[in-house]
Amino acid sequence: MRDRMTAAATELAYDAPAGNWLEALPLGNGRIGAMSFGGPGQDRIALNDETCWSGSPETTRRLATPLGEVGAAAVDRVRAAIAEGDVRTAEELAHGFHSGHSQAYLPLGDLLLDFEVDGEVTQYRRRLDLDTAVARSEYEVAGIAVWQEVYVSAPAQALILRLGASKPLDVTVRLASQLRATTEAVGDDGLALLATCPSSVAPPHGQSDDPVQYTEERGMNAAVVLRARTDGSITSTDDVLTINNSTDLLIALSTATGYDGPHTTPTRTGEECRDAADAVVLSALNKTPEDLQQEHITDYQELFRRSVLTLPSSVDLTTERRLAEAADDPGLAALIYNFGRYLMISSSRPGGLPTNLQGIWNEHLQPPWSSNYTVNINTEMNYWPAETTSLSECHEPLLRYVGELARAGRRTAEELYGAKGWAAHHNADAWCWTAPVDGNPKWSNWPMAGVWLCRHLWDHFAFTGDREYLREVWPVLRGAAEFCLDWLIELPDGTLGTAPSTSPENEYVAADGKPASVTTSATMDLSLIADLFDRCAQTAAELDLVDPLVDELLAARKRIPDPKVGSRGQLQEWLEDLPEAEPQHRHTSHLIGLHPGDQITPDGTPELAAAAARTLELRGNKSTGWSLAWRISLWARLRDGAAAHRLVRELLTPAGDSGTDYVGDGSGLYPNLFCAHPPFQIDGNFGATAGIAEMLLQSHTGELEIFPTLPAEWPEGTVTGLRARGGVGVDLEWSPAAANAVLTADRDTTVVVRHGDHRQEVSLAAGVPQRLTIAR
């Protein structure tokens, strides 16, 4: 039996069924996503498959046609307009590089259950156990005690639903979809849904007259298959599965699509998808219900139990009540930390696609921002907790995807800019879209996505020390650096800069008094490029590479200027001290050198660190959910525990809206703890987990710093399985009287452990835990 602190940190609990999708409980195995409503009488489980997207490689090629002139000469014309101070002409010319849009992540279908029981529902309880990844609902109706458990198993590659009752029940089971779909019986105990995805889906903000298209340029096929086992009887038709007199019902469900990688046209038929899913279901049903659940729990707990945070919590309330009264519940911060890790395990497994804006959970045929990969912050944030919280395997889908994106991005760099190497912009999708989308230059004309994503490749090495992996990704790092060398220009003072340049999604006030975005050398550009050049040099040294390009990178790196401090004491967002059109803007792109980068530190660059703090003060504490999450990490890197905790508290509030809002009105958490932009975006969940980890342990400076930003509101607690660069695991336990750390290294090493101003050199033997007492 778990104690209250542990239960409060690892359980979502409710006293009513989900009334909408944002109250349903997320389940997943990395590939199949499900949202469990837990409804008595009628129940819905919304279904997703991570590979179910609109479009195809052909759609991408068609839509990626530029709207205007491109190539090196076109870039020079934009640069000339910027140099002449003609920002309006520069923005008009920049629009010529735009093209269509990326594709959308789609809802696959719904599993619908009807229980033919009348009467008042009593003693209702619904919960999600983060320790087992099982959702359970239970209640009484008409004198019948009913319970239902749902989970999505990675070993079985199937969703498993088990329904028990104290007296026989009659249940009908259906499958439905927003896609073009048909259903059919599978044997005498199953149902199949065969669906066709749209050939293209436009983002809702594009205001297309025909946003969801089914054309001759076909989308991929997909299927859902389920079969049932019961102690009652089963009758099947093409529309419904009817179960009579059941006290024990087991449903196994799986999905399949025609997706065969980002560069391959899907050719699998709906029938082939059905047969593939059915084979998985039949394999699952060869096992007992008990064995199915145990193998699921064993697989899941091997990942989840590596790192668990507990903080004081004396409350015994539903999750919604806890959220409403969070001021007196430090344990809610532990719950959101553990929930973020749960979501990563459930949405990102080796061999799959990366998590998108909504992880793998989406109910909209035309989802917000296409539920795609937004790679000017959001996709990167999704994976910030992967290495620091012992989920390195879950990082693999993004790391592999970056290699695929680089392949597509070579054509983009050459055709759009006449540049070597590879480039990607702020949107991507399952087909590796890399072009600037049609829209405002402030988000479209930003070719630095590949540069930022390369930092993830380096970070994986920094935490694991895997040189073979580093050698494999060197061509990707090198290609991004090649592009940067071609993109940099010499400025009048002899330094290097970028043009055209934008600071993602933000604008400054131009000389004509109106907002503008295109300029020279946004701080983020130079921070990213400098960091990439540094990482390439380190990679060459680690691997003993002899490459003339590295010498070019080192020479160019010396000419990239540091960020500047502006007239208000802030870190400038652009090369010039330009006034922001929106001073409290959600993006803090110019602080990337503070986090997730390491160019700005309180000890190494105190003036820049102070300017970063001033920037955060000017930005304020009100913003979108994911932006609040980023600011937790930023304040943590500045060692300001009070400020970091203030942002944690700001995030742990009930979200006020599910509509789209860009300034943070309504941000916070929905009843199921999904983070609100609003609307729902999962990056805030992952960012919160990463930020809390940064508050407890940091290693980016070369030292292993314990409790760099521990707030007074967390007087005691425990956390296991934090990870430091260099391959060191860290467990922490603290109270007002004492604190202890247990360090376990992957290989023999020596580390400098820091707490406050105290430093201690510690030698570690591979696999041997070493306990340290930390002064309080």
Image (cartoon, rainbow, N blue to C red):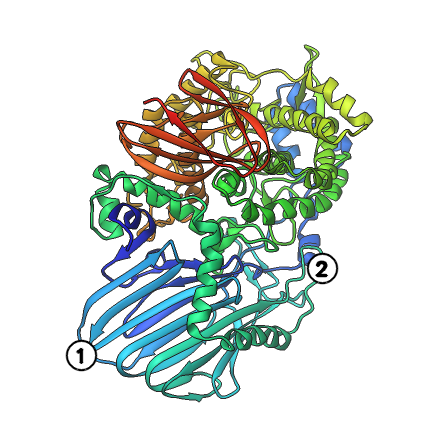
Q: Which mark is residue 769?
A: none
Residue at 40%, 43% in the rendered image: 677
**How far from the left and from the top, in percent, is residue 604?**
52, 15
**Is residue 505 depicted above or below 563 in this figure?**
below
Kindly report which numbered mark, 2 or 1, lies closer to the viewer in this rendering. 1
Q: Compute the Cα span from label 2 to label 1.
A: 55 Å
The quarter of the displayed image where residue 690 is located: top left
Left or right of 359: which side holds 738? left
Q: Nearer the viewer, residue 264 or 8?
A: 8
Disc 1 residue type? Gly
Q: How many marks?
A: 2
Q: Which mark is residue 264?
A: 2
One can see residue 210 in this view = no
Query: Pointer 2: residues within 10 angstroms few (<14), some, or many (20+)?
Result: few
Q: Nearer the viewer, residue 295 or 244?
A: 295
Disc 2 residue type? Thr
Residue that numbered label 1 is attached to: 143
